[in-house]
Image: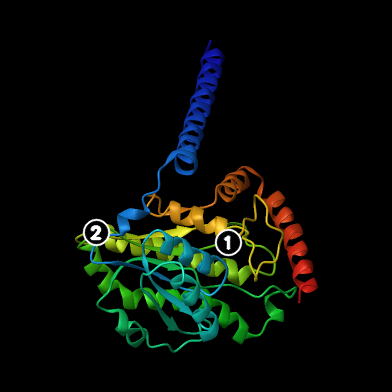
Amino acid sequence: MTRTCESDLLVNFFVLLGAIVAAHQLRRFIAFVWLYLLRPTTVHQYLHDPPAYALVTGATDGIGKAVAEELYSKGFNLILHGRNEQKLAQVVDLLRAREGRDVLTFLADATRSGHDFEHIMEPFRSLNITLVIHNVGGTFIRRERIDGVDEANLSKIVQWNDMFPLYLTRALLPQLRQSAMRGPVMVQFVGSQAEDVSPPTLAVYAASKAFLHALSRGLDNDERVWGTPSGVQFAYLAVGSVTSNSNRVTSSLVSPTASRFAKALVSRIGCGKRSYAPWLPHAAMQWLIELLPVSMVDRLVAAEMHKTIVANEKNT
């Protein structure tokens, strides 16, 4: 009799556990369908008076340029960052030929330290900045492990991905809080799914994106639950492969063009999630990775990394 009771309890426990897991996955699936298939865009809530400006870093190429174009088409004035004056001027000319809104710029090499961000932002202090897209960042594709890379290049990766957006955000925050008194303000950090899988030879890059993930959540907590809420929100974007000059892969469902990706990114701004993948197939891949054994994921990622390195060597 006792054994029967124990057996029944064990069965009931696993039934309950299965129901809880199934309910959790069902909830995630419903949220997934809503975010990627049903939810209307709410980016226009950031177009509040006085004329709203979106600041986009790394805007001379790839995702940054495409996001700038998409935001401009939605009605935002722009503040664009780049390190190449000629390329930045070309983007400005392209945008101004399409619309008549304001396009301002500032130059800074994100891979170098020592910028005076207070001085850099001074010309824009009177503007109503309601969106900040920290897109600048990157890494070097190479075969060497960490001990085969000199300290200067390792520091450059951290400066590029972490310190530049950190210090720029610090300089912007008082102004963003002022803008938030008139309507919602959003700051987004363009991250990477490399953070989740830490590909071989990209350990420092993956770690730099993990820093942005933690920074985004911490800053959001600062502005939301530490003292009086300011109205400034932060979000981290988990980005997979996107076809660009720095990632010369054939465009596909899992590697969209920068233009297609930018449309997805902009359409989901203000979705209410603090961390998410803007592109549906990237989100699906992220979900699948969570279900696979870690050892299997590591082997698959290593194989893909090898293909990426070979392709990069052919293109250089």
Residue at left 73%, top 64%? 308
Residue at left 48%, top 56%? 265
Q: Identify the element where label 1 is drawn.
A: helix
Which quadrant, please, contains the C terminus?
Answer: bottom right
Is residue 34 shown left or right of residue 111? left
Residue at left 55%, top 13%? 4
Q: Which residue is mark 2?
A: 183
Q: Which residue is mark 1?
A: 258
Picture quadrant where residue 173 is located: bottom left
Color style of the picture: rainbow
Q: Position of residue 108 (x, y in %)?
A: 47, 84
Q: Position of residue 170 (x, y in %)?
A: 34, 76
Is residue 114 visible in this depiction of the protein? yes
Is residue 282 shown left or right of residue 248? left
Quick check: 134 above or below 109? Answer: above
Q: Position of residue 294 (x, y in %)?
A: 66, 50
Q: Identify the element where label 2 is drawn.
A: loop
Residue at left 58%, top 72%? 138
Q: Residue furthest top?
A: 1
Q: Residues within 10 Å of mark 2 (few under 14, many from 20)?
A: some
Say what amino acid the circle numbered 1 marks: Ala
Quick check: 274 above or below 204? Answer: above
Q: From the viewer's side, name the closer residue of 24 and 178.
A: 178
